[in-house]
Image: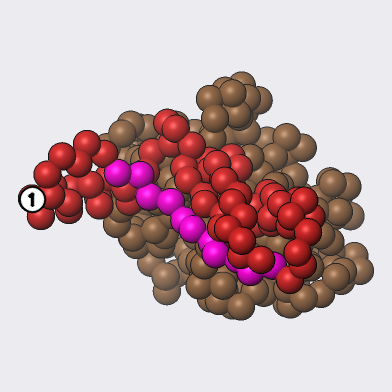
Amino acid sequence: MKARVTVTLKTGILDPQGKAIEGALKSLGVDGVASVRQGKVFDIELAGADKVKAEAALKDAADKLLANTVIENYRVELIG
Amino acid sequence: MKAAILVFPGINRERDMARALRLISGSEPAMVWHAETALPAGTDLVVVPGGFSYGDYLRCGAIAARAPVMDAVRDYASKGGLVLGVCNGFQILCESGLLPGVLMRNARLKFICHDVHLRVERSDTPFTRGYNAGQVIRVPVAHGEGNYEADEETIKRLEGEGRVLYRYCSADGVVDEAHNINGAAHSIAGIVNDGGNVLGMMPHPENHVEDIMGCTDGRGLFAGLTAHLEKAA
């Protein structure tokens, strides 16, 4: 089973990297970019086939390591 | 002093730290590998040194904070044991939950490597008793992620409880945005936990302890710790 955990910065947390990317996009002349926030994507393969167990394991992984919940939110998706 | 210096893959300031501790306390610190599950018997100071543990993968300090030895450090700290984290060590202590908040990318995105001035906010702690309150010291910094941030509530609590021990300032002790090198909330360079026994700081006092380094302002921190532990013993 494949899964994806997406980690993003919470609203209001300063993101200097996102700001720098936003500046670069503007200087490249990419139209219509209002703002950029940078995050992380983890593609994870799970050994079992139990969806409930998988979601619990992924949530555990995100809470314990993948995200720092002081500044980051995460989203867990099973993608079959 | 029976200091234990934690060693993680990618750490590179552990020998500077050992040299400073040996020089000032007169005792040889133990080097403790990250995979250990216990600290040496009788340890009275745990030091988490600077460097780039695990290449700063994922987030600075995130992987080191989950190393086996950190369970022993959490246990030791919960009993009041002294812990000092410098630079990557500060990041590791925040990631491990021993200190609140997080160290973000420097506000101006640059890696900063030069001397800075710090104002010592109080002198009545094991980590600052070698200095006077309000004293300005000069020590180096070398970091890309030293911008201390925490939620408003936490910052208010840190300030209210006098837990900010070191702040970035000018040579004459003025704390303002011009001298806040990395954009840290309230110019915070070093904080302690609610028990006052765990200090995390971004600057490197261990690199200003001998005349050959051009400055010895960092000695006070280690001299203070040594005096504190001798008195306790």
Up-down relation of residue B20 to residue A69 (above or below): below
Residue A35 quadrant: top left
> Which residue: 53% across, 43% down?
A72
User: In the drawing, does residue B203 fall left or right of residue B77?
Assistant: left
Q: The chain shown in brown is which?
A: B
Is residue A23 in sight in this rendering? yes
Around disc 1, counting alpha carbons within 10 Å, would you say few (fewer than 14), some (14 to 19), or many (20 or more)?
Answer: few
- Mark count: 1
User: In the drawing, does residue B1 fall left or right of residue A7?
Assistant: right
Q: Colour of chain A?
A: red
Residue reaching furthest to the front: A80
> Which residue: 25% across, 52% down?
A21
Residue B125 quadrant: top right
Judging by the rendered image, the residue that carries numbered circle 1 is A29
Secondary structure category for the residue under label 1: loop
> Which residue: 65% across, 74% down?
B8
Is residue B190 in sight in this rendering? no
Q: Tag 1: residue type?
A: Gly
Residue A1 quadrant: bottom right
For the record, the magenta segment spans: A36-46
In percent of width and height, residue A55 lies at 71, 52
In percent of width and height, residue B138 lies at 41, 52
In percent of width and height, residue B228 lies at 76, 49
B183, A26: nearer the viewer:
A26
Q: Is residue A63 magenta?
A: no
Q: Is residue A38 magenta?
A: yes
In the rendered image, the quadrant that contains the N terminus of chain B is bottom right
